[in-house]
Image (cartoon, rainbow, N blue to C red):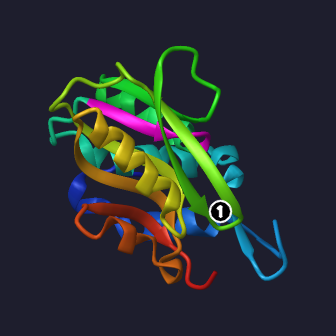
Amino acid sequence: MKSITSASAENYDYQKSCEYIKSKVRSIPDWPIKGVIFRDITTLLQDPAAHREIAAIFYSRYTDKNIDKIVGIDARGFLFGSVLAYKLDIGFIPIRKKGKLPYKTISESYTLEYGQETIEIHEDALTRGERVVVIDDLMATGGTIGAAVNLVEKLGGDIIECAFVVELPDLKGREKLADRNVFSIIEFEGD
């Protein structure tokens, strides 16, 4: 497979790259609860070619967008967001679960598939008007990304796009982001 990083644009097969990435996601039925198919992305991280393709796809998408910061959501958004920030030579901002950040924070609570959660961001993480991409590994019902968007906007960030490696469209997470640009590399149908 020619990677986006080793092939010229005219010889690169984006669809084939996405199919390869999708083939590397492990599906675990009935976890964490019966009836749920958990999409495990740790297998993407273990496969250097898949990880490289994900980084290259995100880099290619955002390299010319004048992004100031990448905001990654705890914890798997850190894995992809920090690599992208490094490649773009810009800052990375973590959004963490409540109680994990050491300085003054603002917080947002939300409902997720299996209960309630609260996430936080440092109150000085962004300067008003900074252009950001908010990134996470997976979008399901949209609760986490919705809360993250609210935090970024409270600090005055200008969200260019919300980005994901995996999207579960049947769970309708995009509906919580109806007025936002959303990008996902791959999708899985069903719950």
Residue 46 found in image quarter: top right
The residue stretch that appears in magenta: 69-76
Residue occupying image coordinates x 29% and y 25%: 126
Q: Position of residue 83 (x, y in %)?
A: 46, 33
Residue occupying image coordinates x 15% and y 32%: 129
**Considering only vertical position in the picture, is 117 above or below 173?**
above
User: Which quadrant, please, contains the C terminus?
Assistant: bottom right
Residue occupying image coordinates x 64% and y 26%: 100
Q: Position of residue 2 (x, y in %)?
A: 42, 56
**Considering only vertical position in the picture, is 8 above or below 127?**
below
Of residue 185 and residue 12, the one placed in the foreground of this image is 185
Q: Position of residue 181 (x, y in %)?
A: 25, 61
**Considering only vertical position in the picture, is 61 above or below 40?**
above
Disc 1, SS: loop
**Considering only vertical position in the picture, is 105 above or below 10?**
above
Taking the image as shown, residue 13 lies to the left or right of residue 136, namely: left
Of residue 169 and residue 108, the one placed in the foreground of this image is 108
Of residue 88 and residue 113, the one placed in the foreground of this image is 113
Of residue 157 and residue 98, the one placed in the foreground of this image is 98
Q: Is residue 5 visible?
A: no
Q: Which residue is mark 1?
A: 24
How many marks the image carries: the answer is: 1
Task: Decide whether the magenta segment is chiefly helix, strand or loop.
Answer: strand
Which amino acid lies under the numbered mark 1 shown in the image of this protein? Lys
Residue at the limit of the structure toward the top, as seen here: 103
Q: Is residue 69 visible?
A: yes
Residue occupying image coordinates x 84% and y 79%: 34
Q: Position of residue 96 (x, y in %)?
A: 56, 34
Are there few (<14), some (14-19), or many (20+) residues within 10 Å of tag 1? some
